[in-house]
Amino acid sequence: MSYVANDEVRPDSPMIRAIEKRGGVVPVRYGQVACLVAEVEGEVVGMVHTAPPVDWLATFPKNRARALAQRILQIELLAVDPEHRGQGVGQALLESAENRLLDQRGHLVYAKVRAGDYPVMRWYRRRGYTIAAQGQSVLINTTQGLTGIEDCGDGYQLAAKAVQPGTKIERFQDQGSEHLIAARSA
Ligand SMILES: CC(C)(COP(=O)(O)OP(=O)(O)OC[C@H]1O[C@@H](n2cnc3c(N)ncnc32)[C@H](O)[C@@H]1OP(=O)(O)O)[C@@H](O)C(=O)NCCC(=O)NCCS
């Protein structure tokens, strides 16, 4: 069996060539949408689709949106074929997405998990993610102050991870509400 692994996700790797053959990396308004696949004997058994959070970015002036897009990555979709689960394929795909963000010197990666899907929440937690309560935002500190992503009240909860070494997600009180924030570790 072969599947995507950390050090294989490099611009000249066979994996990336295979993805590009499928048109998997597409430029969008503020960055790139990327679709990485895991293959076993030429068959796709898993996929991670990442994108800058375009709707949220569109609420900022263009220059600021471009800068923010480098810092935050959304996992739009992560799925592994049921017959190939439990073998590390999902984790390898997740790590490849995190590495993309690290390569662009980004800070925060997040996914939206269906509210109440405890097995998936646990899966993310075991991989260093913090699960936000419904309605709870995840903030990052920028030169222009704190700004953050929310779950849009659509039945999903955010699973977020601070990817830079020496940073982590912490709880943070602001004006009587608790948020999560990507902060430097003490
Ligand atoms: C979440 C998902 C991507 C994980 O993919 P995966 O390839 O099974 O992930 P991994 O192999 O890295 O980890 C599987 C975990 O389940 C355990 N496991 C063992 N056998 C398993 C099996 N037959 N099936 C599933 N999980 C199994 C593993 O031990 C591991 O446990 P851990 O979290 O305690 O380490 C996959 O379950 C999936 O596609 N789910 C449906 C889509 C979804 O919910 N996506 C996430 C929404 S953003």
Image: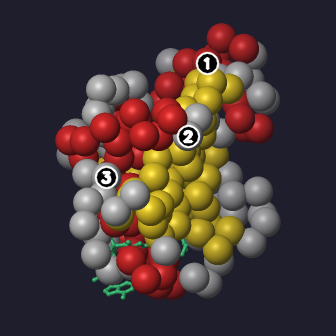
Q: Amino acid at mark 2?
A: Arg
Residue type for callout 3? Val
Q: How crowded is the residue under tag 3: few (<14 C-alpha within 10 Å), some, or many (20+)? A: many
Query: Which image quarter holds the N terminus?
Result: bottom left
Left or right, 64 with respect to 35, comes to: right
**Residue 49 spot, x, y in % from top left:** 56, 49
Any part of residue 54 in sight: yes
- Name which residue type carries label 1: Arg
Image region (quadrant) for ligand 1: bottom left
Residue situated furthest top in the rendering: 63
- Quadrant of the rendered structure where residue 148 is? top right
Give the residue number, with chain letter if any, for mark 3. Answer: 4
Question: Gap in Å between the C-alphas at discs 3 and 2?
Answer: 15 Å
Instruction: Between residue 58 and residue 182, name the one nearer to us.
Output: 58
Quadrant showing the C terminus: top left
Relative side of 144 to 37, left or right: right
Q: Is residue 113 left or right of residue 171?
A: right
Position of residue 58 relative to residue 36, above or below, is above
Q: Nearer the viewer, residue 97 or 45?
A: 45
Which labelled disc corresponds to residue 22? Answer: 2
Q: Secondary structure at mark 1?
A: helix
User: Residue under circle 1?
Assistant: 66
